[in-house]
Every structure is written in C-alpha cells, then in structure tokens.
Image: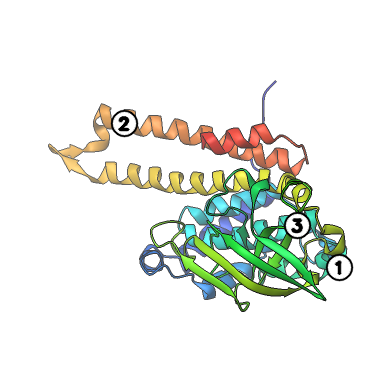
Amino acid sequence: MSINHKEPEHLSLLRNSLRQFIEKEMPRDKVNDWDKNDHFPQDVYEKLCELGVTSLTVPEEYGGSGLDIISTIAVIEELASRSLGLASGFIYCSCYAGLNLLEVASEQQKKDLLPKVAEGKLMFSYGISEPDVGADVASVKTTAIRDGDSLVINGSKRWCSGAKITNYIYTLVRTGPSEDRYKNLSLVLIPPNSEGVIIEPQQTLGQKGTGGTCDVTFNDVRIPKNLLVGEEDGWNRGWEKIVRTGLDVEKIEVAALAYGIAKAAIEDAWVYAQERVQFGKSVSTYQSIRHMLADAKAKLEACRLMTYEGASVADRQIVDPAKMSMIKLFV
C-alpha cells in the first residue's frame, strides 16, 4: 500500500505565509542580536500572532480556529529554522497554555483563558521539575496549602524555561501528605510577578531569546484559589492531569524544534559547500563531502517522517506514549 505524504493545501499555504514573515520580520542579523542579548522580540511575536497561528490549538467555541496539531508542529518547525527563541514563545502560548488548558482546566477557566491563547496573549512556563526531582514528578516537595480564598505556595522549581516572559508558571505542587504521593498533588497557575517569587536564570542553559531556563523559588506566595487548575475539582488530582496526553505532545514539540534547527543547518551546509572553493573547485564536488551531506539529508528526512507521524497520531487522539518517546529520542 502506497502512502501519500503530500501536504494538504492549507498546510502549504501556512508554510508559505510563515516563510514570507520570517524573511521580512526575522532577518538573520536581527535574530543573531536577539540570541546574543537573550532578548525576546515581543513586537515581532505580536506580529506573528496576527497571522492567527496561536489559534491552532484552540477549538472554535473558545475563539480559536480548531485543534490542528500537524499545523502547530509545522509552525514550530518553520520558526525554529530561524529563531529558537520565537519558536519557544509560540510553544509557551499555543502548547503549554493552549493544549494543557484544553485538556485539564475547568470549563470556566477555558472560557476565561483560551480566547487569550487564540490571540497570542497568554503564555505558560512549566514548573514541574525541582532541584532533586526530575522524571519522578510524584516526588515533588513544593507545597500549596489553603488559607481562606487563597493558596499559599512554598518550595522551588528547576528548568522553568521562559519564566521571565510568561504570564503563569504551570506548577505541580503537593497538597497533602507525601506518603500518598500519587494522590496528594495539584496543579496551580502562579504569576511570575507575584510577591515572594524569585526567578534566577541559568545563563549557560536553555533557549536564547526567552530568558533561558530558570530556577524559581516560592516564598509564601499567595494566589487566589481560582488559579487551581480545574478549580475545586482539581484539588489533589494533579497526578491524573499531569500524566495525560499533554506531555506526550510536548515530546513532538521538542522534536519539531530540533528538526527545524537541523533542517536550517543542513541547508546552510549545502550552500556553503557549493560556495567554498578548494583546489580550484567547490568542495561540494568532492565525494567525501557529498557523502556527509547525503547522510545528513537522509537522517533529516527520517526525522521529518517521525515528527509528523507523531503529530498525526496526536491529531487522531490516539494515545501512544511509547511512539512519542521514540520520536523525541530519535530526532
């Protein structure tokens, strides 16, 4: 049985629109300055949102254009081919905020927040890992306790990418005794500018152009109780919310970032190989160079096929964590 890998017309139009935008608004010298200064170009991001791309993870009833994971992954790929920072900003909005809210928020939270995602006006960073907690997220020690109409947060998080530019830190907290580790967890939304929040960027790590990845400390941070994800129904139900398909989709988001960067690198390598002259001819004519470029191109095509297979699986709402992990590992 043959497989048709031809992209639908709407996806080709989206790519063309993005490539025109990139050439006009994201020239290489400007992007280099963003990276050197770790600057997030808010003005360019707002122009990007005018294209409607941040609505791709929001259903029409919440002001979006309808859930389309394949198109979302294509946006990440195209942006990452020029700027990892701007691609990450798109992820913080459309994926970290949009996809998670759609999956685990209360109906009122969806009505309040998803229209902002569709407009590109809401970004989340993740507050999951801690200094001594990585993949074993059920061991988190950051706590939240009830105090009247508020929740009081204490603890610390690590690898909070984008915490300096996002609107909320999507934070996993312990809301009961640690002995019952899988049940006494909840998710909360913490504004980074709240009193008691300390953000410390890790200068040598993370995406340039977003403030990098950060350590975040919460000292008696007080937030309104309606920032409990899922509202009252979300209390002590963080585990079942965090292990849903949102984290699986995150794996192909990472793959799309890597693929976009690799694609641009290989395209640049081919151009350079044609321009670089040694012993009277371009180095692209030497077999050893062509072998390297051919190997890179073959691996790149495998990465593309795996990444978009994952996006197709997600669009069809097929739960396949193993496939998503393989894609992240390979790409």
Mark number, residue 186: 3
Is label 3 in contact with label 2 (beta carbons under 8 Å)? Answer: no
Q: Residues within 10 Å of mark 2 (few under 14, many from 20)?
A: some
The secondary structure type at the circle numbered 2 is helix
Mark 2–mark 1 distance (CA, rounded to whole Å): 57 Å
Report x, y in % for residue 185: 74, 53
User: Which amino acid type corresponds to the residue marked 1 in the rendered image?
Assistant: Gln
Position of 74 relative to 160 (above/below): above
User: Residue drawn 45% across and 30% down?
Assistant: 298
Which quarter of the rendering shows the N terminus?
A: top right
Mark number, residue 191: none
Task: Answer with mark 1 or mark 3, whichever residue precedes in sequence.
Answer: 1
User: Which amino acid type corresponds to the residue marked 2 in the rendered image?
Assistant: Arg
Q: Residues within 10 Å of mark 3 (few under 14, many from 20)?
A: many
Report x, y in % for residue 153: 68, 68
Q: Which coloring applies here?
A: rainbow
The secondary structure type at the circle numbered 3 is strand
Mark number, residue 108: 1
User: Residue drawn 78% across and 41% down?
Assistant: 317
Q: Which residue is mark 2?
A: 290
User: Which amino acid type corresponds to the residue marked 3 in the rendered image?
Assistant: Ser
